[in-house]
Image: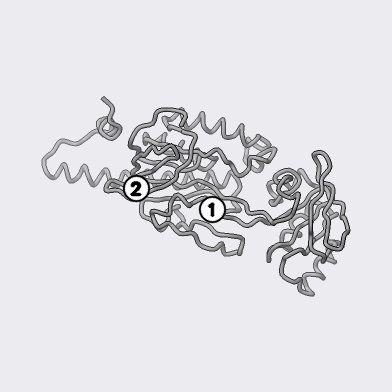
Amino acid sequence: MTMKIDSNYDVVIIGGGAAGLSGAVVLGRSRRSVLVVDAGEPRNAPAEGVHAFLTRDGVSPAELLRIGRKEAESYGAVIVNGSVTATARTEDGFSVTLDDDTVVGARRLLLTSGLVDELPDVPGLRERWGKDVVHCPYCHGWENRDKVIGVLGTGPMAVHQVMMFRQLSPKVTLFVHTMPELSDEDREKLAARGVGVIDSPVTAVESTGDALTGVVTEDGTTHAVQTLAVAPGFRPRSDMMAGLGLDTVPHPMGIGTVVETDPRGLTSVPGVWAAGNVTDPMAQVIKASADAVRAAAVINADLIEDEVNADLARYRSGQRPVNASARASIRLKVP
């Protein structure tokens, strides 16, 4: 941990990426006590820049987080470096155990821990991930326009991915690899778009210095490429929620699993919301942030409803109302 933390918070946010910090800003501006626990493993760390984020296009992921942390802290959010190892239900909400055995209480939880990209097992591929081995045409396409692009086929969405990258370059080749067998119609579409098809499985990815140079196939051929697009599997970082019974479900496109939520971000576990890539693997940074903003607003409204009901019960019993500052002092044990 990097700083002293209190024992109880209105909301504990698990994950301090763009989604988590956006949620913290909204809740902080609503005068909620917020703890953000960040493991420091952002999915987009290898990327040179964040894209399609209005006014921040091209900013490095690290710089975006630095700015975001400063903004969240300016509204009173407490941010600690560490990870959550366990969560459990309590009488007043939840207990959250951190990796240094600190335990804090939370009335509500917001899960913004992101996901893990499970890459194909091809030698040399992971070393170039986020550089010239990419997955998203909207995240990396402009930077790879007109280059020689290979697409590594690993699943049913490979042809769709090819067509997305074909929009960006006329020099695209599909490596069938482990994807389902191509239909005659798909082969015709690829031919019509001038996309080459290599049926021999890929055995390695080659690079020289700091640049991808080629894809090696089982027949011994090395195919020159400058960029390789892959479709990883997606696994949400949600193991710390197992004690609450939070399950994952298969993504409808067959690309991994996700934490399922309703349109407000509420999960199947009452009091637990989720936003960002943990619920939507294809969400770019700006959408992940927007989803967390919405979830945070719903969390605040949910807390308000609890407080109104509690104050109403006191009022009806003849007790004096508890004002907001007094409530905060009681909650945070401020002398």
Q: Is residue 191 left or right of residue 162?
A: right
Q: Residue furthest left?
A: 318
Q: Residue furthest bottom?
A: 184
The image position of residue 183, as x and y in percent, is 76, 74
The image position of residue 24, as x and y in percent, is 45, 38
| Residue in the image at 22% along x and 44% along y | 310
Between discs 2 and 1, the one toward the N terminus? 1
Q: Foreground residue, 206 or 7?
A: 206
**What kind of residue is marked 1?**
Pro
Q: Which residue is mark 1?
A: 236
Q: Is residue 250 left or right of residue 74?
A: right
- Mark 1 and mark 2 in contact (Cβ < 8 Å)? no
Q: Residues within 10 Å of mark 1 (few under 14, many from 20)?
A: many
Q: Foreground residue, 328 or 206?
A: 206
Q: Which mark is residue 11?
A: none
Q: Foreground residue, 202 or 275?
A: 202
The image position of residue 161, as x and y in percent, is 72, 59
Q: Residues within 10 Å of mark 2 (few under 14, many from 20)?
A: few
Q: Which residue is mark 2?
A: 302
| Residue in the image at 52% along x and 43% along y | 19
**What kind of residue is marked 2?**
Asp
Q: Secondary structure at mark 1?
A: strand
* Mark whose residue sits in front, 2 or 1: 1
The image position of residue 48, as x and y in percent, is 70, 38
Quarter of the image with the C terminus in it: top left
Q: Secondary structure at mark 2?
A: helix
Image position of 81 with respect to 92: above or below: above
